[in-house]
Image (tube, coloured by chain):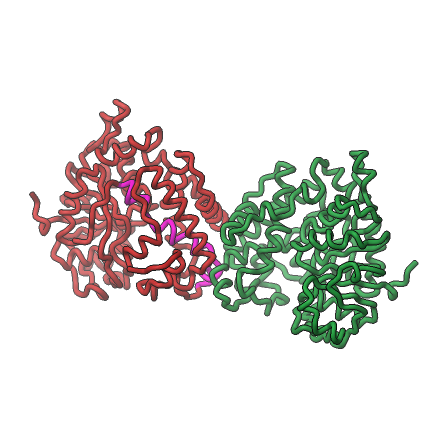
Chain colours: A red, B green
Amino acid sequence: MKSTMNVRYAVIGAGNGGMAMAGYLALRGFSVNLYNRTREKLESLIDNPVITLSGSVEGKGVLNMVTDRIGEAVQDVDIIMVTVPATGHCHMAKAMAPYLRDGQIIVLNPGRTGGALEVYEILRRSGCGKSVVVAEAQTFIYACRATGPDSARIFSVKHEVALSAIPAKFTRRVIRLLSGAYPQFVPAKDVMETSLNNFGAIFHPAPTLLNSGHIERGQSFEYYLEGITPSIGQMLERLDAERMRVARALGVRAVSAREWLEESYGAKGDTIYEAIQNNPAYKGLTAPKGLDTRYIYEDVPCSLVPIASLAGYLGIDTPAIDTIIRLANMMTGRNFWEEGRTVDKLGLKGLSVTEMHQLAQTGEIMKTVVREQEVVA
Amino acid sequence: MKSTMNVRYAVIGAGNGGMAMAGYLALRGFSVNLYNRTREKLESLIDNPVITLSGSVEGKGVLNMVTDRIGEAVQDVDIIMVTVPATGHCHMAKAMAPYLRDGQIIVLNPGRTGGALEVYEILRRSGCGKSVVVAEAQTFIYACRATGPDSARIFSVKHEVALSAIPAKFTRRVIRLLSGAYPQFVPAKDVMETSLNNFGAIFHPAPTLLNSGHIERGQSFEYYLEGITPSIGQMLERLDAERMRVARALGVRAVSAREWLEESYGAKGDTIYEAIQNNPAYKGLTAPKGLDTRYIYEDVPCSLVPIASLAGYLGIDTPAIDTIIRLANMMTGRNFWEEGRTVDKLGLKGLSVTEMHQLAQTGEIMKTVVREQEVVA
């Protein structure tokens, strides 16, 4: 069995999360290949492959490789840590498919809703044919920012992050391998659980849209503590109740946003609004400085749309979620219903709830003999 | 023919608009009965019936009567100026129905969308049986505030306000009678025109909801100049396009919000956002200090809902308007679809577009002999 300290990593994406993660893994002595799609972002690190970390973790991490060639980046690594926005998962999966090897592990940090399913389905359809495990984290492990072309700041590290793999029977193996770097990962039952307990769906698009005047003007304010007022909180309760209804219909252990605030931060309250007000960890988390933010462009298509699509598939009404998606479409001029993750894109179309969990557990669709022969893991 | 200077007025509602209007009419020498539903608001004026005006108009107006009895207020007056929020039109119409006399004129300041139709329909259903003219102004003539129990401030007076009566053949008579006090009123073709060119539908609910964080926190900002950003402006364009589509389907000369900003203020721009930025008259108009505002509680049920209801009746889709109504419902916990003005409440159910205009023009529904006998004017 591979030592958890000899794991070789690729980190995909040199944004805020990728820079912090690559820097940390390298600082901890792991071999790290850092990939970014555009070479410009990497120029400085190509010259000198050292990331300087500040904040919760301080020090310098020396990278094994810095590259804009995906084949090079994933070659010979054990774990591929994907840190690009969830909207990029599809593209990255297609790009790396020809280069993957049996036994490699892809970890989406985080998957948002349906990330692992979407990537798994893309690999299947691409005819990749290798036994690859696709895992997703429920949230990103850090609050962090890239502070320059070769530096990042880690504001805080989460104590516990749920993770699940497809096939779910490999979840514990993935967590064990990651534990040398990140002992914080804990197993979820399957990717339906990590995907449906995606609180970005609740906390990101609605408060952003309902504060869009001030956000678009670039005015600074506390995103959670000031931006989520009692009426906005009431909207979040509705969104959360709909998410929970879909989760329960899918047989997923659904944690409410209020429970999650208490579990994760010890922040108590009778309502989401109260619990947020009682969460000192949110202090200093300011709002995005424009509407061109992941809180809309990532969390509408990759968090709300898949929940709404699953709801529609199961015959559950989600009027609040639908309203926020429509509003986002109208405010941006995009069509997130089309761009976003649907039951079809997640490879779940035609499956019963039991079959969805079978797919998540085994990586195989039991129902159709034809598809059974095609699956990779 | 009655002299325009001998017109006797009742002003219904002692809020911001009612106090300014009653004070002004009295100051100009007209006989004014001021009514308010709750007596508390009137205590000071009952002791001493004098309203002090400041701002664009300065001076003291002595009222003829101050009362919380509606029968007393409307008795012997020629024109009943209703200044209560549009959500109160229904109640006021029912309350005054038993006391109305032939030839009296009710003017809704403003009607929002369908105010005159709703009041006319209520009088018809109540069996009032008198020949009463019901008119609506397209907007309120002042920007003003009550500054105390016996004072009001008029910030500005509009140069031109469209008005129409049911029956529309009496519109010019109403405008002539009002002209002694308000030469600003100009005739609209009929109440369909004043109702569909209600710009409160565009400028009030959406920007309020999309700035709800800051509004609910009571933070001061320029409602139009800061609150309407490019993306919010894009939302307003969609709302306005839907309103125009409904108006055109109703055979109404629809003015776009952008045209209206240019006509009313000389504010030009390629978009609503630009025209607003180029409108110095909006300077100083700050946002409401809470979400418990007429911009939601009046303009959703009495501006957006009737437009959406007419659209549904005519088979026109209004996705943007529907989204704002749904959002308002979810943020407030109300059901504005039910509370608001529907085609049925406006007395338009079963009518063709031609018949709607006939009703507006003549006060009679030509179609059904039964109803023809019932109508009042």
> Residue B21 at what x, y percent from top left?
74, 66
Write the residue at 22% across / 48% down: A81
Residue B7 vertical position relative to residue B335 in the rendered view, above or below? below
- What residue occupies the far top of the structure in this picture? A369
Check residue A203 for magenta coloring: yes
- What residue occupies the far right of the structure in this picture? B1
> Residue A376 at what x, y percent from top left?
21, 32
Check residue A61 for magenta coloring: no
Q: Quarter holding the N terminus of chain B?
A: bottom right
Q: What is the number of callouts on the image?
A: 0
Region in magenta: A191-218
Q: Is residue B96 left or right of residue B243?
A: right
Between residue B311 and residue B67, name the one nearer to us.
B67
Residue A249 vertical position relative to residue B57 in the rendered view, above or below? above
Q: Quadrant of residue B287?
A: bottom right
Q: Is residue A154 left or right of residue B317?
A: left
Between residue A216 and residue A300, name the one nearer to us.
A300
Write the residue at 48% across / 65% down: B217
Q: Which SS does the magenta portion mostly show? A: helix
> Residue B272 at what x, y percent from top left?
59, 56
Write the residue at 50% across / 59% down: B211
